[in-house]
Image (cartoon, coloured by chain):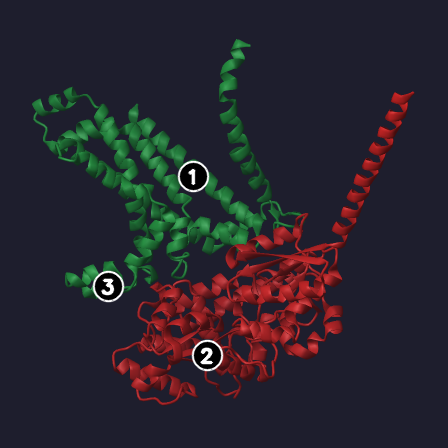
Chain colours: A green, B red
C-alpha cells in the first residue's frame, strides 16, 4: 500500500493531463485521417489531408511566417531580457522594483487588448506615424499593418513587447542566485562589465535560457489571438500563421479533418523544436 | 370497533386526497401538453432583432397555445454553432442559415433542414418574392447549390451594397446632384483629389469591403445573370472575363490616382464608416445595413443610391435577400414551424420590418419607411429588383472563396500580383471546388 501512495498523489495531475490533453491529442490524430465536416460520419482518407498540406503553398507559407515570427517573438525578447536583466541587477537603481513591475506589465495584459491597442498605434493616422512625422521621417510613414513588407515585422514587434517581461523576470531571479564571489573573482582577474556578463552571468543562466527560449518558441508557433485581431492574417497572406489556417478550416469551412492535420503537424513541429532546444543546451553543458 | 371505523374513514379520506392529487397532476400534464414550445435561433444585430421579436409576438397572439423562445447569437459565433445545434438532440424548430457554401450547403447535405416547396406554394411566397430572387435558396438535396432545385429557405429583408454619399460635401465640390454615371462619379473623386481630399473612403484591412466595391464595378461592366450562373457553378462560365478585368483595373486606377483612402489595406473597415459618419470623404460603398449608424451622425446630409449603371443599362451590384429562415428536420411540428416562417416572411410582415428599419424583400405598397435615408434605400432596392440585378455575394461560390477573394484583392490593389494573376487565382479556386462535386 505504502508503495502506491506516491502514485495516488500524482493521480489528479496525471488524470487531468490524460483527459484534457492526451486523449484529445489522440482524437485529433484520429480525425486527421478523415474527411469530416464535424456533423456526419467521418470518411477515412488515410494520409490525404497531410499530402494536401505539404502540397499547399498557402499552408507552407503560414509555417514560414511562424518561423519568421520566432525572431521577434522569441529571440528578440530573450536578448532584450538578458540585456535589461544585466543592467537592472548591476546598477543599484533607486526604485528598481518599480521598473521591474513596469517592464513585466505587458506580459500580464490580455492579448486581445494588446492587439487592439497596437492596431491603433500602427494605424495610418496613429501615433507610430505621428512620431515619425515629428522627427522629420515623414517619408517612412505608412499603414503598417496593411504594408506587404512591414506587416509581419510590425506584428512581431508587438509580440516582442508583450513577451520580453517573462524572460526578464526569469533572468533577474537567475542572476540573484549567482554567488557574488564569482563576480569578485572575475573583477580581480580584470574583467570589465561586458566580459563579466559573458564569462559569469550568461553561463549561469543556462537553465533559465532553456525555459525562456522553449516557452517563447512554443507561444510563437501556436500564436493566434494577436495576429487574428491585428491583421486577420493580411495583407494578402503576409501574416497568416498556422493557427489561423486551422481555425478557418475547422470553423469557417467545416473541414475538420484537414484542420486536425494542421494541428497535429503543428504539435509535431513544436515537439521537435522543444527537444532540439533542450538537446542543444544539454550538449553544450557537457 | 370504533377504532376500526375511524381507520376506515381515514383510509377513505386519504384515498380521496390521493385521487384528487392524481387527477390534478394528470390535468396539469394535459394542459402542459397542449402548450407547444418552439425554439427559434437567429444571428443577432439590431434592428433585425426588434423586427423579428414583434413578428414572433404576432405569431404567439394568433396561436395562444404556442410559446416561442427566441435565441440570439452574434453572427460570427452563430454560423459556427448552428450546424452542431441542429445535429444535437435539442435542435431548434426554426433557424437562420446563410446562403451558398458557407452554411446552407452543409445543412442540406447533412439533412438538418427540410425543403419548403410545399409551404412556398401554400403561402404564395413565389408570387410575392418573384421566382428569380428565391434561386439563392435553392439547392440540390446533396448540398450542391445549383440555384434551381428545392427551396430550403426564405429571407424577408434585403441586404445590398450601394453608395452612401455626403450631400454637403458634393455641394462644396460644386455638384448639385449625385452622380448618375461612372464618369460623373469619377469627376467627383477627381475634383476632391484636386483639393487634396480622398473622396472614396476605403477601409480594406480585412478585405471584405474590397469584395463589395469590386462587385459594384463588375455589376457596372458586366451581367448579374452571368455572375449568378458562375456562382452556381454553370459549366462554361469563368471569372476570367473582360468585365471582371475592367472592374479590377478601374479600382486599381482609383488607387493610383489617389481617389481612395491612403494605406487602405491598413485601415479597418469600421474605421472607414466612422470617418464617413464624421464628415470625411464623399462616398462610402457599403451595405444598406449600416444606414442607421451613418444616419445618426450625418443626419440629412447623407444620401444613398445604387452604384452607377453601365453598358447593360441595369442597376446591378452586390446584394441578396437576408439570411434564410429554415425549418429543422427534427422539428416535431414542421407545419407550425413553417407557419412561423410565413409570419416572419409574408406580405403582412413587410410594414413591420420597414418600421424596424429593414427593407422588405418584396414590394410593400403604401407602407412608408421611417426616415428619408431608408426611403432612398428602398427606392434603390426596387430599381435593382426590377432589373433583377443582384449579383448575390461572390464568396458564396466555394467554401474558401471569402479568404481567397479578400487576400487576392488586397494583393492586386497592393501591387503584389497583376490583374490577370488575380483573375486566374479566383477561377482556379472555383474550378478546384467544382471538381470536388463532379467526381
Q: Assess disc 2: are there few (<14), some (14-19) or many (≥20) residues with their C-alpha within 10 Å of its C-alpha.
A: many
Left or right: residue B43 compared with residue A241: right
Distance between the alpha carbons at the discs numbered 3 and 2 = 38 Å
Local SS, label 3: loop
| Circles 3 and 2 on the same subunit | no
Distance between the alpha carbons at the discs numbered 2 and 1 = 55 Å
- Residue B389, given in percent of the width and then of the height, sits at 56, 80
Q: Nearer the viewer, mark 3 or mark 2?
A: 2
| Circles 3 and 1 on the same subunit | yes
Q: Nearer the viewer, mark 2 or mark 1?
A: 2
Left or right: residue B412 compared with residue B191: right
Look at the picture and state if B68 lies above or below A108: below
Q: Say which chain tag 1 marks.
A: A
Q: Which mark is residue A270?
A: 1
Quarter that holds the N terminus of chain A: top right
Local SS, label 1: helix
Q: Look at the image and tell me whether residue A74 can be seen.
A: yes
Q: Which mark is residue B373?
A: 2
Look at the picture and state if B370 lies above or below A279: below
Residue located at (31% from left, 58% from top): A120
Quarter that holds the C terminus of chain A: top left
- Residue B81, given in percent of the width and then of the height, sits at 57, 53
- Residue A178, given in percent of the width and then of the height, sits at 21, 23
Q: Which mark is residue A141?
A: 3
Instruction: Check contact, mark 3 vs mark 2: CB within 8 A.
Output: no
- Residue A141, given in percent of the width and then of the height, sits at 24, 63
Q: Assess disc 1: are there few (<14), some (14-19) or many (≥20) residues with their C-alpha within 10 Å of its C-alpha.
A: some
Residue B418 in which image quadrant: bottom left
Q: Nearer the viewer, residue B265 or B234?
A: B265
Residue B26 in which image quadrant: top right
Local SS, label 2: helix
Amino acid at each position: 500500500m505504502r508503495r502506491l501512495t506516491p502514485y495516488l498523489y500524482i493521480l489528479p495531475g496525471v488524470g487531468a493531463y490524460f483527459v484534457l490533453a492526451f486523449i484529445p491529442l489522440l482524437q485529433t490524430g484520429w480525425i486527421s485521417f478523415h474527411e469530416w465536416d464535424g456533423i456526419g460520419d467521418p470518411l477515412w482518407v488515410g494520409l490525404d489531408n497531410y499530402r494536401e498540406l505539404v502540397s499547399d503553398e498557402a499552408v507552407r507559407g503560414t509555417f514560414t511566417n511562424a518561423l519568421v515570427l520566432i525572431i521577434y517573438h522569441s529571440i528578440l525578447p530573450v536578448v532584450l531580457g538578458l540585456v535589461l536583466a544585466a543592467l537592472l541587477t548591476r546598477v543599484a537603481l533607486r526604485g528598481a522594483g518599480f521598473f521591474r513591475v513596469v517592464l513585466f506589465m505587458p506580459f500580464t495584459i490580455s492579448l486581445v487588448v494588446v492587439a487592439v491597442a497596437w492596431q491603433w498605434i500602427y494605424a495610418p493616422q496613429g501615433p507610430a506615424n505621428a512620431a515619425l512625422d515629428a522627427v522629420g521621417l515623414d517619408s517612412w510613414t505608412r499603414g503598417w499593418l496593411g504594408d506587404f513588407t512591414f506587416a509581419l515585422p510590425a506584428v512581431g514587434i508587438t509580440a516582442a513587447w508583450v513577451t520580453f517581461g517573462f524572460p526578464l523576470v526569469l533572468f533577474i531571479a537567475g542572476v540573484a542566485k549567482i554567488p557574488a564571489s564569482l563576480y569578485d573573482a572575475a573583477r580581480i582577474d580584470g574583467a570589465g562589465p561586458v566580459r563579466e556578463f559573458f564569462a559569469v552571468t550568461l553561463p549561469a543562466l543556462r537553465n533559465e535560457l532553456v525555459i525562456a527560449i522553449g516557452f517563447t518558441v512554443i507561444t510563437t508557433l501556436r500564436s493566434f489571438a494577436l495576429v487574428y485581431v491585428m491583421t486577420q492574417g493580411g495583407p494578402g497572406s503576409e501574416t497568416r500563421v498556422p493557427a489561423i489556417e486551422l481555425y478557418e478550416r475547422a470553423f469557417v469551412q467545416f473541414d475538420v479533418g484537414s484542420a486536425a492535420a494542421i494541428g497535429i503537424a503543428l504539435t509535431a513541429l513544436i515537439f521537435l523544436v522543444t527537444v532540439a532546444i533542450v538537446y542543444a543546451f544539454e550538449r553544450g553543458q557537457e | 370497533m370504533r377504532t376500526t371505523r375511524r381507520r376506515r374513514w381515514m383510509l377513505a379520506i386519504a384515498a380521496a386526497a390521493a385521487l384528487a392529487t392524481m387527477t390534478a397532476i394528470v390535468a396539469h400534464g394535459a394542459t402542459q401538453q397542449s402548450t407547444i414550445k418552439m425554439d427559434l435561433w437567429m444571428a443577432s444585430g439590431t434592428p433585425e432583432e426588434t423586427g423579428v421579436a414583434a413578428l414572433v409576438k404576432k405569431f404567439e397572439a394568433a396561436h395562444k397555445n404556442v410559446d416561442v423562445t427566441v435565441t440570439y447569437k452574434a453572427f460570427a459565433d452563430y454560423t459556427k454553432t448552428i450546424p452542431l445545434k441542429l445535429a444535437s438532440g435539442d435542435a431548434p424548430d426554426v433557424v437562420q442559415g446563410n446562403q451558398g457554401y458557407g452554411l446552407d450547403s452543409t445543412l442540406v447535405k447533412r439533412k438538418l433542414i427540410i425543403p419548403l416547396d410545399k409551404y412556398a406554394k401554400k403561402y404564395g411566397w413565389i408570387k410575392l418574392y418573384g421566382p428569380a430572387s428565391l434561386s439563392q435558396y435553392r439547392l440540390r438535396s446533396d448540398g450542391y447549390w445549383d440555384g434551381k432545385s428545392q427551396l430550403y429557405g426564405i429571407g424577408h429583408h434585403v441586404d445590398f451594397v450601394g453608395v452612401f454619399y455626403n450631400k454637403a460635401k458634393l455641394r462644396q465640390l460644386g455638384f448639385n446632384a449625385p452622380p448618375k454615371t461612372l464618369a460623373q462619379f469619377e469627376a467627383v473623386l477627381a475634383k476632391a483629389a484636386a483639393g487634396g481630399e480622398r473622396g472614396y473612403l476605403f477601409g480594406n484591412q480585412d478585405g471584405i469591403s474590397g469584395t463589395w466595391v469590386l462587385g459594384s464595378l463588375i455589376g457596372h461592366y458586366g451581367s448579374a445573370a452571368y455572375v449568378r450562373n458562375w456562382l452556381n457553378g454553370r459549366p462554361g462560365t469563368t471569372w476570367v472575363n473582360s468585365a471582371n478585368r475592367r472592374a479590377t483595373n478601374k479600382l486599381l486606377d482609383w488607387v493610383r490616382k489617389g481617389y481612395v483612402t491612403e494605406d487602405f489595406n491598413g485601415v479597418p473597415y469600421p474605421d472607414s464608416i466612422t470617418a464617413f459618419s464624421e464628415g470625411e470623404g464623399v462616398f462610402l460603398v457599403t451595405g444598406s445595413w449600416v444606414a442607421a449608424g451613418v444616419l445618426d451622425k450625418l443626419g440629412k446630409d447623407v444620401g444613398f443610391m445604387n452604384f452607377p449603371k453601365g453598358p447593360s443599362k441595369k442597376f446591378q451590384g452586390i446584394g441578396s435577400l437576408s439570411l434564410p429562415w429554415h425549418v429543422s428536420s427534427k422539428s416535431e411540428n414542421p407545419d407550425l414551424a413553417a407557419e412561423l416562417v410565413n409570419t416572419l416572411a409574408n406580405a403582412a410582415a413587410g410594414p413591420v420590418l420597414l418600421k424596424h428599419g429593414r427593407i422588405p424583400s418584396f414590394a410593400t405598397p403604401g407602407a412608408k419607411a421611417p426616415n428619408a435615408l431608408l426611403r432612398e434605400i428602398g427606392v434603390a432596392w426596387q430599381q435593382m429588383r426590377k432589373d433583377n440585378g443582384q449579383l448575390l455575394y461572390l464568396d458564396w461560390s466555394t467554401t474558401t472563396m471569402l479568404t481567397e477573394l479578400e487576400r487576392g484583392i488586397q494583393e492586386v490593389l497592393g501591387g503584389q500580383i497583376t490583374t490577370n494573376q488575380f483573375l486566374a487565382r479566383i477561377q482556379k479556386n472555383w474550378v478546384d471546388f467544382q471538381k470536388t462535386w463532379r467526381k
